[in-house]
Amino acid sequence: MKIQTHQLINREYCGTPLVLEKGYSKVELKTSDTMMVDETGLVHGGFIFGLADYAAMIAVNHPHVVLGGAQVKFVKPVKNNETVWAEAVVEDGDGKKRNVNVTITNGKETVFQGLFTCFVLDRHVLK
């Protein structure tokens, strides 16, 4: 299946797609020193959220999908040089609205959970 959205996204910061099926995606992010917020190696939550958002967008996989809202929970911290995987599942949709559940794990534990509300528009949001 071909990715139809977010064509120019920076995969270094938002992850690399591993699996894409109808209504499902799995995306891998290898964290790095440039994502750290302090000397302990804690990764800024924005990178984890970005990974989750990207996984949700490609699970919907429409050229004009946008994020409308999200309910998220950061469960465990992520450190630099750690690899995490996001799995996104489109749960339901009504008209232009799609609800996408996203779980991010470090291979052993869940580090993030979220419900993303996405909208499929008739045209690009900036047009």
Image: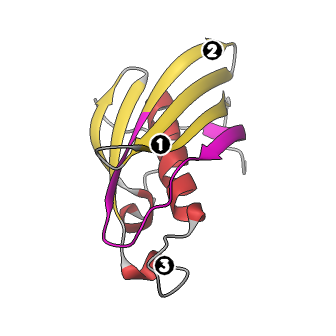
Q: Amino acid at mark 1?
A: Thr
Residue 55 rendering spot, x and y as whole percentages: 45, 41
Look at the numbered disc 1 and give the secondary structure of its residue: loop
Task: Report crowding for label 2: few under 14, some 14 to 19, many 20 or more residues within 10 A (C-alpha).
Answer: some
Q: Is the residue under label 2 in contact with that under label 3 (CB below 8 Å)?
A: no
Q: Is residue 37 a member of the stretch shown in magenta?
A: no
Looking at the magenta stretch, what is its main secondary structure?
strand
What residue would you read off at disc 2?
93
Q: Earlier in the sequence, mark 1 or mark 3?
A: 1
Look at the numbered disc 2 and give the secondary structure of its residue: strand
Q: Earlier in the sequence, mark 2 or mark 1?
A: 1
Residue 19 rendering spot, x and y as whole percentages: 27, 35
**Looking at the rendering, which quadrant does residue 92 occupy?**
top right
Looking at this view, is 49 or 56 the one in front? 49
Q: Which mark is residue 5?
A: 1
**Alpha carbon separation for disc pair 3 and 2:** 36 Å
What residue would you read off at disc 3?
36
Q: Amino acid at mark 3?
A: Met
Residue lying at 31% horizontally and 32% vertically, measured from the top left: 20
Residue 32 rendering spot, x and y as whole percentages: 36, 75
Residue lying at 43% horizontally and 66% vertically, measured from the top left: 13
Q: Amino acid at mark 2?
A: Gly
- Give the extent of the magenta segment: 65-87
Residue lying at 51% horizontally and 37% vertically, measured from the top left: 56
